[in-house]
Amino acid sequence: MAYVAVTGGKEAIAESIRLLQYHRCATETPLALEAVEKSMDLLIHRVMGEAGFYCPAYAALALKQCEGSVEEAVFLLRAYRSTLTRSYYSLPVDCGEMRLIRRISSVFKDVKGGQMLGPSYDYTYRILDFGLCQEDAAQAHRQAAAILAGAQPRPLERLETVSQGLRDQGLIHTPPENGEEPFDVTMENLEFPCPRSARLQVLARGDTGFVTGIAYSALRGYGFSNHPTIGELRSGYVDLTIPYLFAEGEQIDLGELLLTQVVSYTALDDGEAPGSLTIKEGFGMVFGRCESKAIAISILDTTLDEPGDAPCNNEEFVLMHGDMLEMNGYISHLKLPHYVTFQSKLSSVRKSREKGGAQP
């Protein structure tokens, strides 16, 4: 026999789980949830986005519970999310009303309201800061206070989108409103071809590495390739509201969400007639400040509408293979016992070699 079954059963599993607790609690000082939530923003935002569940505190708890594994944290949050009752449907969010903390455009040097760099690693040197090794809480608080004291006060602004100006000039292709309710991927099964609302939801919940990699393949020329430009990237806070049931036309403000929206522009020819060249928008939106993913979604929003044999043009390939849980779950299932199936393969190999006269 090539395989010998592992013995131990429940006892071995219990010991494995106990060892997990050892690895998670190996330090003298337990990891504070507040430290994870407040100091690991980008990680928290990625987990919330792939889980489709906006709650920074619970995302921090999930990351602490599973030693920082993104896939396990997403699994925990989605499992918890599935137990919650859906009481309301929120009203549509207008990103033109977003209270901005960052807003840049790659298509115009001067945009109405100006470029707002905001918090970003784009302008930093990629050099390890060994001074952080000696950082303590008091020092960090002093640095934060000094930054706030020296900053120029600027309120969170609401600025018109870059697209609105181009749309007013008739330069952007604007698809007609169809009045359909958005597809809900958490309640309905995908059927191909699927509506754009379903695509954007699946991509927003998809694995960040997968979504970014497929979009990168499009930029490198695999399939439809037409280098897009970021018309506008904006991050900021939007109000989450629901209708007030007892007064028509009124609404209740439940709080706010931090979102990143990207609109990318691609020049496309709508037909053979003169003057048919137009600008098509690609749209991407994610929880938090996950900018690369939002850009990648906006690229795929365009490529999935174009014909081609490459993965980036294949709706079913892109949407069915990027889900964090399904992708990692299927890969991880290979660690489960496959004794019987492998013995069948071995038997087939032995019979084949015997028929061919090969020596074992």
Image (cartoon, rainbow, N blue to C red):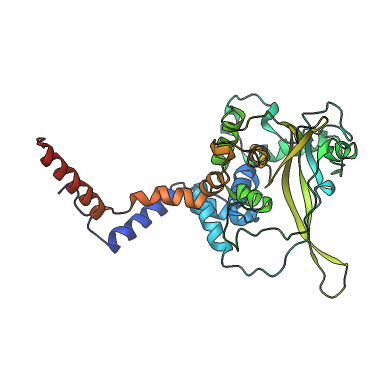
Camera-nearest residue between 108 and 72: 108
Residue 168 image point, x, y percent? 90, 39
Relative vertical location of residue 103 with respect to residue 345 in this rendering, above or below: above
Camera-nearest residue between 138 and 35: 35
Q: Residue at x 58, y 56 (%)?
A: 191
The quarter holding residue 253 reads bottom right
Q: Please give left or right for residue 317 compared with residue 297 in the image.
A: left
Q: Please give left or right for residue 260 compared with residue 48 in the image.
A: right
The quarter holding residue 11 reads bottom left
Q: Please give left or right for residue 147 compared with residue 248 in the image.
A: left
- Confirm whether residue 333 shows in the render: yes
Extreme residue toward the front, this view: 273
Residue 165 image point, x, y percent? 88, 37
Extreme residue toward the bottom, this view: 246
The quarter holding residue 17 reads bottom left
Residue 105 image point, x, y percent? 79, 32
Camera-nearest residue between 289 and 41: 289
- Confirm whether residue 232 shows in the render: no
Count numbered badges in the picture.
0
Q: Residue at x 59, y 47 (%)?
A: 36
Please state, as top left, top right, bottom left or bottom right, where the C terminus lies in the image: top left
Residue 248 image point, x, y percent? 87, 71
Q: Residue at x 11, y 41 (%)?
A: 354
